[in-house]
Amino acid sequence: QSVLTQPPSVSGAPGQRVTISCTGSSSNIGGGYDVQWYQQLPGAAPKLLIFGDVNRPSGVPDRFSGSKSGTSASLAITGLQAEDEAIYYCQSYDSGLTGFVIFGGGTRLTVL
Amino acid sequence: QLQLQESGPGLVKPSETLSLTCTVSGGSISHYSRFWGWIRQPPGKGLEWIGSVYYTGSTYYNPSLKSRVTISGDTSKNQLFLRLSSLTAADTALYYCVRHEYLPGATVDSWGQGTLVTVSS
């Protein structure tokens, strides 16, 4: 069981907007620690998509955006494309006993 | 450009100890303010942080694995090492070598390609 909770799956048609939630607690997201999002394409290592809650590394399209409120964070993908089909993980730091680097269980995005 | 390359045995027997090496190029593991660590992913499952070492040599481990894990680094060879003992089938996974920050979110900004380790007799 992951420290951060994500829905197992989401889906959307090409061109649509989807959001993926990530719920934590006061020892991680709610404690003000940054949330990151990673995209894992089939057979590949995870790739940093969003860091510091809302920032995109160079090269990440602005169709991807992050937000955070309280003990939760969200990843939004607009103008959905077939190549966005992947597993998305949220990640943060935990100040409690669960570990230094914590992840959500991952959300599989299906583009219909 | 930073590159991390994992190496080690692909098959290990139950109860034995796994030893993996990560060779880092394009950057130094003694770089200030960066952690070097290991993350694993069982087949078809999510990501699990195993542990990390800071440039000072200080180590941090996942509490659930702490009793079985040792992570160290060799700055002269720019290599990172993982030792995981008392292996069971549950340790079968893709093992990634990573670099990450500390605060404010422990962002993992570099990943190796991963090496698959199967625990089986």
Image (spheres, coloured by chain):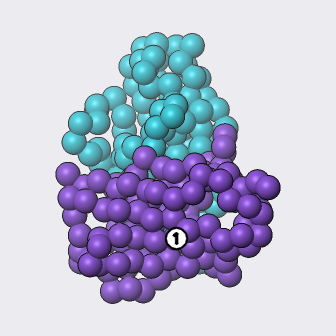
The part of the image, by quadrant, that contains residue B63 is bottom right
Q: Is residue A48 above or below residue A76?
A: below
Tell me, yes or no, if residue B105 can be seen here: no
Residue that label 1 marks:
B82
Q: Is residue B65 above or below residue A104?
A: below
Task: Give whichever of A43, A25 is nearer the camera.
Answer: A43
Q: Secondary structure at mark 1?
A: strand
Residue at point 51% right, 34% down?
A43
Estimate the x, y position of residue B110 in percent, counting from the top left. 34, 54
* Left or right position of B106 against A106: left
Chain to which mark 1 belongs? B
Task: Give whichever of B11, A13 is nearer the camera.
Answer: B11
Say which amino acid is labelled 1.
Leu
Q: Colour of chain A?
A: cyan
Task: Give whichever of A83, B96 is nearer the camera.
Answer: B96
Tell me, yes or no, if residue A56 can be seen here: yes
Residue at point 60% right, 76% down?
B69
Q: Is residue B73 above or below residue B21?
A: below
